[in-house]
Image (tube, coloured by chain):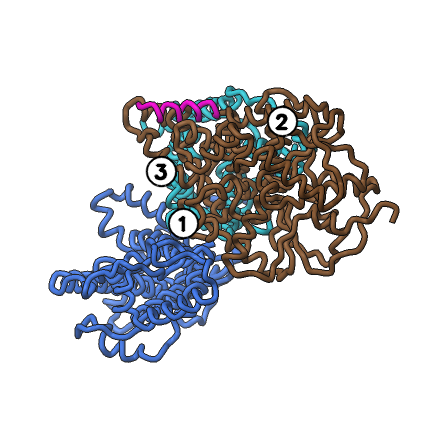
Chain colours: A cyan, B blue, C brown
Amino acid sequence: MFEQLVDGIFWDIALWVFAIGVLWRILSIFRVRNKPDYSEPRASGLAGAIGANLRRFMPRSEMVSRTRLQFVAGYLFHLGLFALLVFAAPHVLFIEAQTGLSWTAMPYWAFIISAQIAFIGLMLLWIYRIMHPVTRLISDVDDHLAAILTFIVMFTGCMALLGEFNGLRVLHRFMVELWLVYFPFSRLMHAFMFIPSRAFTGAWFGRRGVKA
Amino acid sequence: MSNNRQSRIRHHRMVVFSLLSLLLLTLVLPLIPYAVADLGESAGKVVNPGADLWREVRQRDRSVIGTTRVKGVDSGVLINVYGEDWRQFRMQRLIPYGAALMGIVLSVILLYYLVRGPLRLQGGPSGKKIQRFTVFERTTHWFTVSVFWLLALTGLILLYGRFVLIPLLGPDGFGLTASACKEAHNLFGPMFLVAILMLFVTFVKDNFYARGDMTWLIKGGGLLGGGHVSAGRFNAGEKIWFWIAVLGGIVLCVSGLILDFAVFGQGREVMELSHVLHGIVALIVITVSFGHIYLGTAGVEGTIGSMTTGYVDEAWAKSHHDRWYAEVKAAAVDDSETEPAGGGSASTGVASPTRDG
Amino acid sequence: MNDRLTRGIEAMRAQMDSRVMSYMSSCVHCGICAEACLFYTETGDARYTPIYKTEPLRKLWRQEYTFWGKLAASMGLSKKLTEQDLADWEELVYDGCTMCGRCSLVCPVGIDIAYMIRKVKEGLSAAGFSPGDLVEAGRRAVGIGSPMGVTLATLQATIRVQEKETGIKVPMDVEDADYLLLLSSGEIAGFPEFIGSLARIFKATGVSWTISSDYFEATNTGVQLGNSKMATILVERVVAAAGKLKVKYVISPECGHAYSTIRWDAANFIGRPLPFKVVHIMELLDELRRDGRLKTDGVTDERISYHDPCNAGRRGGVLDQPRKLLNMVAPNFVELPETGAMNWCCGGGGGVSTIERANELRLKVFSAKKRQLDAVKVAGLVTACSNCRHMLEDGLEDNEMYDVELLGITELIADHLAEPGG
């Protein structure tokens, strides 16, 4: 019963909530009008927007020593998660079954490494969030919930790895569904929103001739 | 043509006959021991001819090495004789003794708490705080804690699940749980190596033997006799725990990796040994961690803050780690002499900015 | 809901734009902005975390623009933005932020945090939670025409002294001049030699310039206060003065926020393009250098460095010009560590140096600048902002760093000006 729901209607609902929610959130940004900038630009705002989107993937040299843990753990987590999400063998099979699209899955050893670095990154970031006075002060329920939910999704995925127990697969998929539904209403939206944010800031600085 | 046909018929006949004989042989084969037993009984002192056969099958003295077209480690071994020893050890030693060890230590701790209660801070807190652990040190600690307990819980379920969980979940439910725990345990294992390395690098400098550690040990850290014993940043008990965690952690990691990645030519014997070592060390480290947890939380008043906010009361520092307290105070005086405007003020309970980055 | 809170909320609501929405939706509370902010790094107090200073705006966004916020608000579950919040944030936003925007350059998701703090100020000032000193300065700026109360008579007296010293007539109210020079009150009162220096440079390079007696103030207290109405009034005065004299260019003097305001914000305050071009004095001098009109003679052998004013450099884009100018006269120029767009703020910008109760704090956070200076060990520090220069003076004195001499870049150039025909 529960299995049919998770594999059927729950999955459809989760996907629709995710897709419509994310689109709605992105569109709602542009629903509010920005006032035109009448100042005379020194350089191209568009170039600044693109430049900032690329440059902000790396920390400024001045910041490296002060933000080493966040930088290392942040990259470990995001790269690991991305690799798991897109190239884990069960995921590739699942996506093929759902969409017909298929690509090469990563080998088992690569999966192990991806899972390791994703977990290490996520745990370090979350513990740091609780330990550092700054992040402890500015974090809210949403930050913690997003971290815990993502951890549970990844953890149930690992538990289901053997593929022998359908119950574990269903549990993992159910957690993914919760995560998808939570996504558009939460901090997880940063996965999309960082692009317009960097673009706005990059354009603002770009017009002034400053590389942001 | 007819000759050809005749030979084919003969061939078919032979095949059918061979198959039938084989079938008969197979059916009779299990009866051989009974026949042998009968024979032995009736024949009195006649040596059991099956014994030699089984001795060779079991390859106990390695006089016979099996051959097979299957290429792989131990593929020439039909029956691993040590497997039974290992099983016996796991079921009759590791599981009951491990449970007893953990149970006794937990009971002693509980009893001590009920009888003596927590170690109170004499004279109460001073209200002034000093930083004991930086953000990075605390992050390292809790990262190790998280990985350790994920592994400990999944490991304990694998070891004790059949006694504790089968009655609760039933065999199917436990099968699922055990599979989940095994996968999680295997995947989290390598992370423990990272955690142990981080722990080692972060804390090793204050965990070498120093003068006064022996005195501390003889006096039982003041826990037994009462009265406080002089200590540096870490007392002898904490140092021992550090080395148990690091060395035990390394043994756990190495033996765990041998079990986890059976693709490097390690045979069953090596894996059995690894498992025995893994089990014993894991149970010891888990048991010692009970003591660590007790002393860090309920056991000693004012300690928990050192690993949550990073700060402890000055009175706590003075009473438990007097030499460390003196060092911190001396360093603070140096700092304020050389750099009047810089640095976070420790006494107001804010983090030191330069160390938290 | 009471009046003050309503005014504050309405002012902030008016500030909600795509950028704020996007920024609010992308912050993951990583805390990296704190590591770029001198108020955090130098005090270690987490409350000075830049994104935390935007908390009132975030609360409003949450309760009015997000699903959970709206849901919780409708059920009375969430903690709404209160008047107390606004009161509590006054000190953080006005005393504990110089609007230097260093945080905006380091945010991994690209949030311009200073942009949002500016919007929080809009709400606080509308609700009446602004420091009295700054409000008074604003009153003087609107009433007298200068936040420091420098009147036309004072300016004229100063100019007379400078004319006497240089022997050059300072052109007042000259119609159809190319350039209209604005001045900051801090310069007129503290560094009047700037006027004389410019007079000499402009004479040597043949620049047609003037000062308006209608309006000469370059600074804009409305921006520091977070009062767009006031800022617009002050900008309109510049536009009117420039229009009356029909100048082609307006020169922003050595002042950071004056430049970023008149160059980048002014057109948006008045809602139309400016009828003139704006140049920072560094830009103009560099242009004269490039055209071969500005020539120098001799150099200073001292080891000197340059302090980028945040609003001219990081948030204004005037980064190369001062370096090219210094290259003419100072062969022993060295960069500060973490320089250019990532330079540390002096600690007195954004109106902080106007707020008397913030004196202790701004001198404490000056330790960031001290660290930079200790690393290069220079004899002279040049800057292009009179407010920075005042703050640097205070900071150096407070730290007993008497061996570092402060210099204005225009004076340095003027001191090495090649005599015409020479």
Instruction: Find the distance from the CA under tag 3 to the CA under tag 2.
Output: 40 Å
Which chain is indicated by disc 3? C
Which chain is indicated by disc 1? C
> What residue did someone put label 3 on?
C88
- The answer to which of marks 1 and 2 sits earlier in the sequence is 1
Q: Amino acid at mark 2?
A: Asp
Q: Amino acid at mark 1?
A: Asp
> What residue did someone put label 2 on?
C214
Label 1 crowd bin: few (<14), some (14–19), many (20+), radius 10 Å: many
Which chain is indicated by disc 2? C
- In the rendered structure, find residue B118 and report the number of the disc placed on it: none
In this picture, which residue range is highlighted in magenta?
A: C1-15
Give coordinates of residue B346: x percent, y percent. 37, 58
Q: Secondary structure at mark 1?
A: loop
Residue at the right extreme of this rendering: C421
Residue B124, quarter of the rendered image: bottom left
Give coordinates of residue C248: x percent, y percent. 73, 26
Question: Horizontal placement of A39 versus C169: left or right?
Answer: left
Question: Horizontal placement of B96 versus B30: left or right?
Answer: left
